[in-house]
Every structure is written in structure tokens, then in C-alpha cells.
Amino acid sequence: MSNTPQASSKSYAIAVSLSAIFGVLGIHHFYLGRYIEGIIDFSLAVLTMYFYLHGEILWAVAFFAIDTLHTFIITIMLLTGSFKDGHGKYVCYPGQTLKTPFQG
């Protein structure tokens, strides 16, 4: 098994755009092949709407805050080129060079 980092074939621009615009729904995770994370994000959005529509505002705010914080962190990781797709390959920003880890 190689420790050499590899670049994903997924588009950086599409991944960042999906995360920034539809992040709380988890669509960027589905695009990147990270289906479990996508289902979790989508579930958090559904729970937010469920509790909001049933008058449980505190629970709705809690689920929305968790989902928004998670989306913010993932978007930052995508912007910095440190997020991996579903195959363990880095979603690289244009011009990013992947460095091999120190082998000592």
C-alpha cells in the first residue's frame, strides 16, 4: 500500500460550490462519493424541518446549528485542499501539489 497522496478526479469548483450553496443538505458528500456523510447531513436537515414545523424551535435550532457548523468546517477543508473524496483521494484546488509524507 502506497502512502503517496493522490488527487481526486472530482471537480474542485463543483465540490466547493455544492458545499457552499447546498451544504446543509449534504449534496456535496453525494457528489464526492461519501454517501454515509451525505445521508447524515440530509437527515439533520430533515430533522431541523420536522422539529421546526412541529413547534419544537429549540430542537430545530440545535440540529440546524450542528449541520451548519459541520458544513462550515467541510467547506473550509475543501477550500484548503485537505478534504478527501469517497476513494480517499484529495479534492485539490487548482495548482495544488500533493506532498508525500515524511518517511523516516
Image: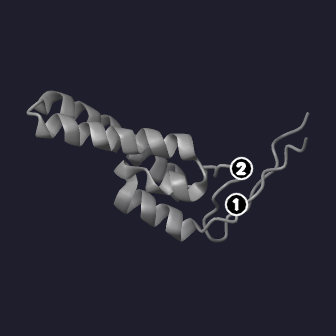
Q: Is residue 4 above or below residue 47?
A: below
Secondary-structure class at tag 2: loop
Q: Residue furthest left?
A: 55
Give the residue at mark 1.
Answer: 8
Secondary-structure class at tag 1: loop
Decide: few, some or many residues near mark 2? Use Cα within 10 Å; few <14, some 14-19, many ≥20.
few
Q: Is residue 64 left or right of residue 88?
A: left
- Image point 63% across, 58% down: which residue? 91
Identify the amino acid type marked 1: Ser
Q: Nearer the viewer, residue 32 or 95?
A: 32
- Image point 55% across, 46% down: which residue? 35
Q: Look at the numbered discs 2 and 1 and tell me whether their residues touch, using CB distance below 8 Å.
A: yes
Which label is found at residue 87? 2
Separation of disc 2 and disc 1 at Cα?
8 Å
- Image point 67% across, 54% down: which residue? 90
Residue 69 visible:
no
Q: Is residue 87 left or right of residue 44?
A: right
Q: Is residue 5 left or right of residue 92?
A: right
> Where the C terminus falls, by quadrant?
top right
Tell me the quarter of the picture where residue 49 sits: top left
Q: Is residue 21 left or right of residue 77?
A: left
Residue 93 visible:
yes
Q: Position of residue 29 (x, y in %)?
A: 52, 51
Q: Is residue 63 above or below residue 5?
A: above
Decide: few, some or many residues near mark 1? Use Cα within 10 Å; few <14, some 14-19, many ≥20.
some
